[in-house]
Image: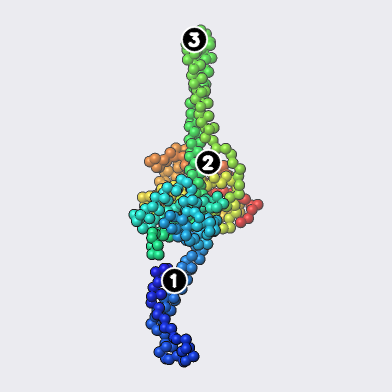
Amino acid sequence: MLEFGHMLAVDCKWTLRPQNDCDKPMTKQEVAPRDGDKRFVQLERELRANEDRWDAVLANPFMGITVLDKNQYFITTNSTFQAMVGYTEDELKKITPLDITPANERETNRILFNELQQGKRQHFELVKRLQRKDGQLIWIQLYVFRIADRAATGQHTFGMNFDITEKMQAQDALQAARAELERSAHVSRMGAMTASIAHEMNQPLAAVVGFGSAGLRWLEQTPPVIDKARECLKNIVRAGQSAADVLEGVRAMFKSKKLANVSIDLNQLIEEVLTLVQGTVKKHDIAVHTELDRAIMPVTGNRVQLQQVLFNLVTNAIDAMESVADRTLLVKSEREDSDRARITVEDSGTGIEPQHIDKIFGSFFTTKVEGMGMGLSICRSIIESHDGRLWASAGRSRGAVFQFTLPTNPSQSK
């Protein structure tokens, strides 16, 4: 501003008339503006236009704007930034951005600012947190660059700040939902696995116990029993019972505790699961179509378990389309009859071999190289525990179709 004002003073040439000539009419040449006057008016207009533009930038409600001096103290902040951090402009002029940055993030900020001041970089951008005056932490997307200060020595730093707190909270919630779903799936798989193992092992273990008990009785008859044989048979009984106890303990450890059933909007459940897999869908270039019947009534059940079923069916469909070029996923909800709802998951993948249709829901049966064969078995168990039915069929042209039905809650309407 000093250079600009000096330029105005130099360019503007004023002509003063003697005082005794004030009553005389001005000549035509005197009335006509001189070149210096025109230049002054033009520069004044340009100055006002620049000030209006700057005021408009500062007054924007979408981003916080900050200007820092060479020592990183706030010089100017707009009302948006002040509302963002809860400080007044006068309060901000007494502090630096590092003062409202969490301690564990200050060093990164300090390094970037120093590199900017030293000319090692012209700008930087950063996702960081700021601590409001009330102590609340917010997330911002920060863009910073240098601006020259011609009226003084040094550089000023210009910052644009966007509040992305809601975005980061949504990402955290999505990540938490994914983690919970993975944990639930892991626990369910382990529970189903130990249950299956216990079921398979109980028969031979029962036989060991039975034969051992019979052996003890025979040995107790005449001819006299050999003590070593009796002790051996006792060991068989003891080992068999111990094995059964271990298996039962593992089964109980992984058994999920019973959760209260709630009313569930199936369409909302579908949308939530599709949100969870949207990153995978984009990565594999899959076109997702939904046909949601908004008239279906809610169902009553365990929300996490039903979400797990749908998540499993959708991820299986995604895996089935890995080797095909045209990848389409359809998720559909519809009213089957007056008191039941049907969910359909259809893919355009490689499909299921006819001889496997009746086997895919069995424990430990899988067509995947690294699969455990537990997912669909668990899904069917969950659906059946909700008084529903789960089945599979071939697609209309290719791929596979998985469908399940659940009883709706007639006491609630959409």
Q: Residue furthest left?
A: 120
Q: Is residue 145 above or below residue 299?
A: below
Residue 335 lies, in percent from the top left, at 56, 55
Hey, what amino acid is under mark 2?
Answer: Ser
Residue 253 lies, in percent from the top left, at 53, 33
Viewer-nearest of discs 1 and 3: 1
- Say which residue label 3 marks: 227
The answer to the question of whether label 3 and label 2 lie on touching residues, with beta carbons closer than 8 A, is no
Q: Nearer the viewer, residue 413 or 360?
A: 413
Under circle 1, the secondary element is helix
Let me know if residue 401 appears in the view. Answer: no
**12 relative position to 261: left or right:** left
Hey, what amino acid is under mark 3?
Answer: Asp
- Say which residue label 1 marks: 50
- At x 42%, y 78%, the residue is 40
Under circle 3, the secondary element is helix
Q: CA distance from mark 3 to mark 2?
A: 49 Å
Q: Is residue 321 above or below residue 150?
A: above
- At x 52%, y 21%, the residue is 210
Hey, what amino acid is under mark 1?
Answer: Asn
Q: CA distance from mark 1 to mark 3?
A: 108 Å
Q: Earlier in the sequence, mark 2 or mark 1?
A: 1
Q: Earlier in the sequence, mark 3 or mark 2?
A: 3
Residue 54 lies, in percent from the top left, at 46, 68
Name which quarter of the figure residue 68 lies in: bottom left
- Say which residue label 2 marks: 381
Under circle 2, the secondary element is helix
